[in-house]
């Protein structure tokens, strides 16, 4: 019994002293730093680096410094729930920049009714976008479902008659494709869906699935997955003789790793872009370059850019709240409510070219995307910015 | 009442007092600490189940996560599609998982050791496939959402209320397992583990008791899975993958195979060690400057600690604690003899 009591005391002492201090604005960020999908985790480092940059460049906001707390959710629901609880309870964060669709759904009650903390999801699932049901959850851009529609529209314009989907056997893969089929979007556009092919997410070889695609011979195939699996799909497609030019990937397939890894087997592959790429000649890039002079940047890619934009959004909303409060930090629950309200009011916010102007009335920053294609090992735009709705 | 039991009462009362007062005594970080306690309690129940099967009966299983999944899906399906209350769903989760456990355990008649482990691994993959593809029941990869339950009018929708449920069930689980090994059934398990041929020779129906062990183990896993489902309020197949089974194997190895408190120590260790490493690394962060390799380094430290642990104390934490306990009681005994406070030792002081 003494051992048990000692253990409890040690735990409590260990946890003491981690809380927020006056003059600090803690911002919680979690992503997959070690789990699956680490290929796109630049968007977890982005907000942290952006807020650190603001601290260094402008001394924070109205005399208060940001304390970005970045934790690893490992792309697993229990881990994400755990780090969320730590962020809101121990670190007392004002805003949480979250990660997966499943984790966001698992936390929906905590976010919206129990804790009431503004939550910026990395997930672009339509299922977590609902200003009435989920008033504290915000997304930055077009949902996965929007992106499917954009790809189909583009394919139709190019004269396509048939279409197919390929994705991993997880919700992120299955749901958007199935939603599109159930909502009869292909029929409305005059496209026939020949197949909805699934593969085990961790499978190293997707040849059997690509052979089925080859048999079906659709005009275009939509990949609802992220970079690593996209590389596998295109690699095995080349193996069985399906050209990369038939494939269109979502926004998490826009990565320079793809042409670098696949060389000519990646030529003609198309991906959807919802935010600026690394190195673009935009004002936001100047900020990042300035930050990069003093700091190492973990991931130099479009996902880091997305994360940087999210950091800017958080800063903008908190700035507006502090202006209203005369520079005083409100009590934490009040602070969170004020941030939520201010976020919803954010309109035509210029991110410095990182994204189109952001308006959060419907909790979705923007609804635009464009299609890129790999030519001579580089992505180039083959469409204008297309509005989904 | 036996004298030894009477001496234990103050401790039991103290435990009860700590149990009741603990969630109200936390002056900060209540939700987070209680979350860790709740996850540990669920881990204890699951680890107890695996320890009964592997530690006490000697049957290696890599299917614990899938069994927990069966329990979780049972709770979710009965709760959402049938609309049954929690007090029916949780036992039902245990019972349905028991039936699945018996089916999965059937090959244990002919298989043991790594071969049995492989057959439970097959069950893990099979069940995962069912969770993913029996969409009319499980909603496939999208998973099922359940609303936090109500018991006797109490809405179990926060960490504090859930604490009383999860820790109570974990304590009941420990008591149940403790009593099990006082019965012929429990002793038959141990006999099978130690030497199954000898057990058969002395009249133990080895196959029957192996299946009983699978059944009891699965019941624990089912209840743990059901609790997990109520706590997370969402279940999908990703939550019950092989890595979770490996975590449970780690719990009983680190805690101590074939010891009840080994399951408790193991669950605490596996749930809390990553947190302790996280804290330590955060403190050391300004010195180490490992901003971007921090998360991966944490995993390495976790792995290394477990390896060091297994090399230096393969019998687990329970062995360490029992050795410490023996040393303390020996020292007390010696002091008592020197003080002359032990009966019959007065003369020794002269």
Image (cartoon, rainbow, N blue to C red):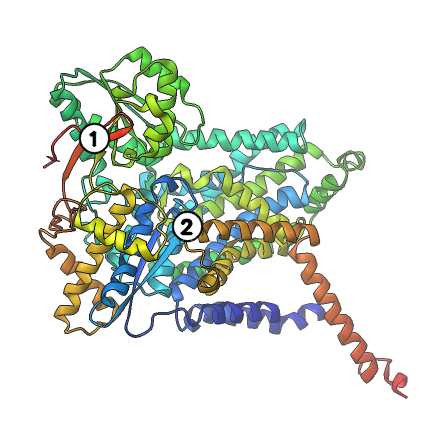
Q: Nearer the viewer, residue B173 or A147?
A: A147
Element under disc 1: strand
Q: Position of residue A155 (x, y in %)?
A: 16, 22
Q: Nearer the viewer, residue A19 or B212?
A: A19
Q: Residue at x 18, y 39 (%)?
A: A142
* Chain bearing mark 1: A
Q: Which residue is mark 2?
A: A79
Of the two numbered discs 1 and 2 in the rendering, the one whose residue sits closer to the viewer: 1
Q: Residue at x 37, y 69 (%)?
A: A19
Is any atom of residue B256 visible in this view? no
* Chain bearing mark 2: A
Quarter occupied by residue B74: top left
In screen coordinates, is A114 left or right of B192? left
The numbered mark at residue A380 is: 1
Q: Quadrant of the C terminus of chain B?
A: bottom right
Q: Nearer the viewer, residue A316 or B222?
A: A316
Circle 1 packing at 10 Å, graded few (<14), some (14-19), many (20+), is: some
Q: Relative to residue A289, is residue B12 depicted above or below?
A: below
The numbered mark at residue A248 is: none
Q: CA distance from mark 1 to mark 2?
A: 38 Å
Q: Position of residue A96 (x, y in %)?
A: 29, 56
Element under disc 2: helix
Q: Quadrant of the N terminus of chain B?
A: bottom right
Q: Earlier in the sequence, mark 1 or mark 2?
A: 2
Q: Position of residue B258 (x, y in %)?
A: 67, 49
Quarter occupied by residue A219: top left
Quarter occupied by residue A269: top left
Q: Residue at x 36, y 56 (%)?
A: A70
Q: Residue at x 60, y 53 (%)?
A: B305
Q: Position of residue A153 (x, y in %)?
A: 14, 25
């Amino acid at each position: 019994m003494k051992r048990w009591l000692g253990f409890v005391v040690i735990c409590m002492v260990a946890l003491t002293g981690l809380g927020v201090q006056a003059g600090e604005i803690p911002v919680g960020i979690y992503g997959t730093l070690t789990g699956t999908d680490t290929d796109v985790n630049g968007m977890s480092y982005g907000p942290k680096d952006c807020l650190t940059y603001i601290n260094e460049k402008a001394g924070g906001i109205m005399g208060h410094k940001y304390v970005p707390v970045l934790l690893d959710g490992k792309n697993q629901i229990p881990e994400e729930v755990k780090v969320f609880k730590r962020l809101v309870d121990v670190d007392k964060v004002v805003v949480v920049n979250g990660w997966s669709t499943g984790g966001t759904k698992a936390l929906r009650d905590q976010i919206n009714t129990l804790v009431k903390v503004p939550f910026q999801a990395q997930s672009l699932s339509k299922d977590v976008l609902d200003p009435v049901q989920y008033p504290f959850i915000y997304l930055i851009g077009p949902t996965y479902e929007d992106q499917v529609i954009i790809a189909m529209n583009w394919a139709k314009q190019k004269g396509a008659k048939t279409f197919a989907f390929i994705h991993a056997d997880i919700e992120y893969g299955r749901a958007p494709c199935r939603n599109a089929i159930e909502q009869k979007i292909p029929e409305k556009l005059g496209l026939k869906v020949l197949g909805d092919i699934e593969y085990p997410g961790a499978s190293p070889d997707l040849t059997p699935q690509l052979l089925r695609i080859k048999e079906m011979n659709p005009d275009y195939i939509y990949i609802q997955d992220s970079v690593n699996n996209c590389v596998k799909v295109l690699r095995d497609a080349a193996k069985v003789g399906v050209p990369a030019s038939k494939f269109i990937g979502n926004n998490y397939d826009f990565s320079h790793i793809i042409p670098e890894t696949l060389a000519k087997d990646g030529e003609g592959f198309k991906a959807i872009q919802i935010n600026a790429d690394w190195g673009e000649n935009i004002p936001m890039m100047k900020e990042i370059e300035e930050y990069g002079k003093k700091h190492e940047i973990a991931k130099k890619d479009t996902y880091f850019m997305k994360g940087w934009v999210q950091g800017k959004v958080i800063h903008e909303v908190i700035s507006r709240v502090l202006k209203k409060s005369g520079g005083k930090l409100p009590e934490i629950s009040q602070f969170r409510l004020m941030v939520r309200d201010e976020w919803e009011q954010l309109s035509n916010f210029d991110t410095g070219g990182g994204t189109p102007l952001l308006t959060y009335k419907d909790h979705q920053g923007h609804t635009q995307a464009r299609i890129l294609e790999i030519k001579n090992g580089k992505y180039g735009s083959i469409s204008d910015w297309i509005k989904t709705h | 009442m036996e004298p030894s039991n009477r001496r234990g009462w103050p401790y039991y009362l103290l435990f009860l007092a700590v149990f009741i007062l603990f969630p109200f005594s936390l002056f900060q970080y209540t939700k987070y600490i209680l979350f860790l306690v709740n996850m540990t309690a669920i881990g204890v129940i699951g680890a107890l189940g695996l320890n009964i099967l592997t530690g006490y009966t000697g049957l290696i299983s890599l299917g614990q996560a899938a069994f927990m999944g069966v329990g979780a899906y049972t709770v979710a399906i009965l709760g959402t599609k049938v609309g049954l209350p929690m007090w029916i769903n949780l036992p039902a989760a245990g019972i349905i998982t028991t039936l699945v456990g018996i089916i999965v355990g059937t090959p244990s008649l002919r298989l043991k050791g790594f071969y049995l482990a492989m057959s439970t691994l097959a069950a893990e993959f099979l069940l995962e496939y069912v969770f993913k593809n029996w969409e009319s029941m499980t909603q496939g990869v999208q998973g099922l959402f359940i609303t936090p339950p109500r018991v006797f009018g109490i809405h179990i929708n926060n960490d504090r209320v859930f604490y009383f449920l999860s820790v109570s069930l974990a304590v009941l689980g420990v008591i149940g397992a403790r009593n099990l090994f006082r019965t012929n059934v429990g002793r038959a398990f141990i006999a099978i583990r130690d030497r199954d041929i000898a057990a058969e020779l002395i009249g133990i129906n080895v196959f029957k008791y192996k299946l009983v062990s699978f059944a009891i183990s699965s019941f624990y896993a089912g209840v743990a899975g059901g609790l997990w489902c109520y706590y997370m309020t969402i279940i999908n197949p990703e939550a019950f993958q092989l890595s979770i089974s490996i975590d449970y194997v780690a719990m009983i190895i680190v805690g101590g195979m074939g010891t009840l408190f080994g399951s408790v120590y193991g669950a605490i260790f596996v749930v809390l060690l990553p947190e302790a490493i996280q804290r330590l690394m955060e403190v050391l962060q300004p010195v180490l400057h490992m901003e971007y390799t921090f998360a991966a380094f944490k995993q390495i430290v976790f792995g290394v600690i477990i390896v060091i642990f297994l090399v230096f104390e393969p019998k687990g934490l329970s062995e360490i604690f029992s050795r410490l306990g023996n040393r303390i009681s020996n020292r007390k005994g010696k002091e008592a003899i020197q003080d002359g406070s032990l009966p019959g030792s007065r003369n020794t002081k002269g």
